Amino acid sequence: MKASNEAVNDKKVIIIGAGPAGLTAAYELCKASIESLVVEKDTTVGGLARTVNFNGYLFDIGGHRFFTKVKSVEEMWNEVLGSDFIKRNRLSRIYYDEKFYYYPFRISNALLNLGVWNSILVITSYIKSQLFPQRPELTFEQWVSNRFGKRLYQMFFKTYTEKVWGISCNEISADWASQRIKGLSLFTALRVALLKQKNTASENSIKTLIDSFHYPRFGPGMMWNEVKNRVIDNGSKVLLGADVEKIYLSDNKVTRLEINIEGKSEVISGTHFISSMPVRELINKLSPVAPNPVLEAARNLNYRDFLTVILIVNKKEVFQDNWIYIHDPNVRLGRIQNFKNWSPDMVPDQNKTCLGLEYFCFEGDGLWTMPDEDLIELGKTELTSLGLADKTLIENGTVVRMPKAYPVYDSSYLESLEVIKQFLANFVNLQLVGRNGMHKYNNQDHSMLTAMLAVRNIRGANYDLWKVNTDKEYHEDISQAERTDVDELSTLATTQPLHPRLFTIKNEKLTGLDLLIKAFARMDKFAFALAVGSASGLAIFVSTFWLILTGVDSRDPNFNLLGQYFIGYTVSLSGALIGLGYCFLWGFIFGWLYAYLRNLSISVYLHRVKRQAESRSFKDFLDYI
Amino acid sequence: MEGKKINTEEENLYSAVMILNTKMLGLTLGISIGLVIFIATNWLVLKGGHIGPGGEYIVGPHLELLSQFFIGYKVSFMGSILGFFYGFAFGTIFGTLIGWIYNKIVELRK
């Protein structure tokens, strides 16, 4: 997407959506003294990262931990929030059968909670899965069962996954488990396994962010409201309650938008457009209408929706966690947020608790269309049935629905998205950013980064926003050294055209892989057997021949000892040949066996390293659902 | 895309065939065999021998047979040093030969 050569003052950027992506774009544009106008359909900013106020109780839509590997994003958070950006300890367990299970799993805690009989069943199931894995491994169910055992899968993965996605686990591809949860590289796993053995007490040990995170004192909405205020103070505008009805195209450009504010239509023009609205909606609002294949592709993009039932409980502590995962198949709710544990300032009365009961659904389904009072009643009933709080303690409640909370990665979405991308690439002044804007199941920091780079593109850079994929390297375990060393923006700025792959040093990766291949490559059994056999046979032949040449008495029993093992061997020419034959045979067998055992042990080691890395990679799987 | 790249790396790893470093193999085997002979000889020297039928002191009569191949070798401390060098030479040649034959066969099979 090449920016025009217009002077800064000639640029007017229209931003659709006032979520993290849209507002970040506006904020960055303010810093560059470029005028912008943000149009937001809702009456509040923040998008999926909003905070809602219900009778003084603040709650979020889902949980929004603020952590990132991206320096510029982190800087923006600190810049905006200052001392209101507080650090919180993380505790988020699984609640199952009225017991709390630590997540990531702790074996002792899990076994203790399960009890003796269930523990035996789980262990037996695990052993069975290791001895008789399901092949081929095509579905998510098979992938998880093969690694954790069927029983553990059914208890802790199946129910929750199906609640979140509304799809049976045996219809989800196995690729989703391995690729979605950080692409696992055997190379990386080997490096970790080998280096770990050397540097167990290293000062630069991996710092995990799983145990803590940052959070705005009054919720993520605090962040985005502050950004909105700064954007407005800088002379740009944020229009709330402004629904985009039409997006007009002409000559490979977006020219203007038609918006509806309070029933009145208004047309706004701009030189550049940044959209974070759901891409399905974007396509449907284009004028002239997009070609049929593009419309069809847009129709094929699906979303998972979300509603949260807020309950105010007259109880000081319901549970200690920031949130808990509900794996119980007997209730429909998937997660419970305890907003007081995110920040004490989220509740006005510390003797009470504000809980967010999260239900995953599809817009228009039974849950979605249920009246609010019924949803609140359902929430109360389920909370009580879980044993977390009595109904009588629940004072008040409300419901918030969030459509298009999660883009769905079904079997057709990639192809559909590709069609849309190719079509929209024709419009040089339109950029898509954010989760729904790009139909990319990403986190807030990724949305913000795409917005930052979109602004840089407007200022003359040439980033391909579709290639910004911090998901690949995005994991919570990063080294402190890496965070301080890498300046992703300057790194990106030095490469043209730019494909911002962060934290990848290609050359080092190749060299390391070559070394690992050299170290772990299999030995050719036949070749080694032949080599050892030949060399051994030759050694005996030469030795025997040497004895003959030196005039050793061929009847001397000492020199015929080999005859005990090699029947027919004597210190003579014929004996030398016999010895050659025998030694070749035994050398061949020994060499083959050695190579076989070596390959087997290397294979076992690699398998073990990979499985350990998979388990490590999978331990925070629930965070990525 | 990333998944595909990772699978290629793994495929490369699993399909690669080891090439032996003949020098290193020779050196390793040379040192190993040299050390075996050195230790075995000195072990017998320290363990001590017995008086033979002719009244002579016999130490390690079987290991002494190595003198047929290693001229000058004896079951004594000096002999152990000589034996080390002979063993080293033999092991080096043996190991290099194995490595060379192996690499040639692997090359042919490719």
Image: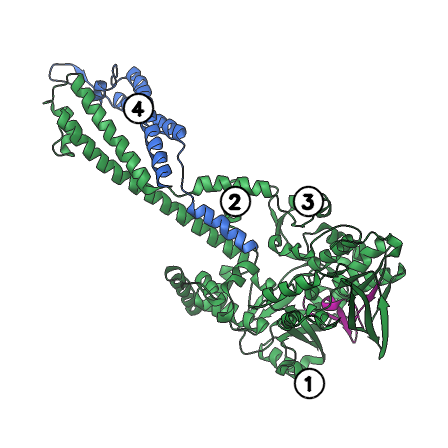
Chain colours: A green, B blue
Q: Which residue is mark 2?
A: A191
Residue in the image at 51% along x and 49% along y: A189
Is the C-beta separation of discs 1 and 3 under 8 Å? Answer: no
Q: CA distance from mark 3 to mark 4?
A: 54 Å
Residue A12: image location, x then y, percent? 85, 60
Q: Which mark is residue A371?
A: 1
Identity of the amino acid at label 1? Answer: Pro
**Front tag of 4 and 1:** 4
Is the C-beta separation of discs 3 and 4 under 8 Å? Answer: no
Q: CA distance from mark 4 to mark 1?
A: 90 Å
The numbered mark, 2 or 3, whose residue comes first in the sequence reads: 2
Residue in the image at 66% along x and 65% along y: A420
Say if A440 sits above or below B101 in the image. Answer: below
Residue B12: image location, x then y, percent? 46, 46
Q: Which residue is mark 3?
A: A486
Residue in the image at 51% along x and 73% along y: A168
Residue A333: image location, x then y, percent? 60, 75
Chain at tag 3: A
Identity of the amino acid at label 3? Answer: Val
**Which one is nearer the viewer's eye here, A357 or A29?**
A29
Q: Which residue is mark 4?
A: B90
Q: Which residues are magenta?
A: A37-63
Q: Secondary structure at mark 2?
A: helix
Report whether residue B30 is seen: yes
**Which one is nearer the viewer's eye here, B97 or A328?**
B97
Classify residue B24 by image quadrant: top left
Chain at tag 1: A
The numbered mark, 1 or 3, whose residue comes first in the sequence reads: 1
